[in-house]
Amino acid sequence: MSEPATAAPATAAPLSLDAFLALGKALANGTDGGDGTELKPLYDAFTPLPGLADLAAIVAGTPPAERDAVIAAKGLTGLARALTAAWYGGMVLTDLTVADYDAAAKWIAAHTPTVTTYYDAAVWATTGLPAPGSSTAGWASWTGKPAAG
């Protein structure tokens, strides 16, 4: 009698850039972190990490009030926190590993962050302040005449 065939373990398809952008925005409570061009280094750093597709599926399919519990139950809290911090800060550690997820202080001290976006980092939109060295009124706005009134 022959044994039944067993399916090979499925390999998760890489997360698309659009799905990654939706994931980051959802984890940041709707704060846009920039476009695909600006966030491509962030995407490139996170897509090889195991659990990213699972995290995206949880975030897309779980009501916001229940997300933290489901993410924690699946052991993805560190990944979610790392992505959220990178999303807001505009920097990513390009040598993240699974072992680094929950040791944030350790990996920040031990690795060199790479700036992925500065002027468009979500932190500025969240605080309502311009990035240092920039203006909310647009480039060279200070050279124009003041508004009448």
Image: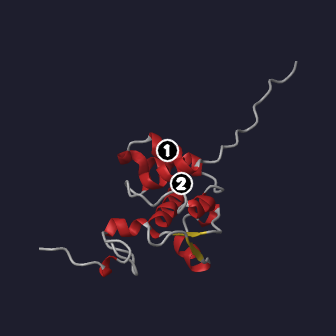
Amino acid type for the residue under numbered disc 1: Ile
Residue name at image x 72 percent, y 39 percent: 9
Snapshot colouring? secondary structure
Residue 29 lies left or right of residue 52; in this view the side is: left
Are the residues flagged by discs 2 and 1 in contact, CB closer than 8 Å?
yes
The single residue placed furthest to the top in the displayed view is 1
Q: Residues within 10 Å of mark 2 (few under 14, many from 20)?
A: many
Q: Residues within 10 Å of mark 1 (few under 14, many from 20)?
A: many
Residue 91 lies left or right of residue 125; in this view the side is: right
Residue name at image x 45 percent, y 61 percent: 33
Q: Which residue is mark 1?
A: 58
- Expressed as whole percent of the image width and height from the top left, the position of residue 92 reads 56, 68
Q: CA distance from mark 2 to mark 1?
A: 10 Å
Amino acid type for the residue under numbered disc 2: Leu
- Please identify the quadrant where the C terminus is shown: bottom left
Query: Is residue 133 visible to the viewer in this orientation of the structure?
Result: yes
- Please identify the quadrant where the N terminus is shown: top right
Residue 73 lies left or right of residue 123; in this view the side is: right
Residue name at image x 53 percent, y 48 percent: 18
Location of residue 69 with respect to 123 vertically, above or below: above
Q: Which residue is mark 2?
A: 76
Location of residue 106 by image quarter: bottom right
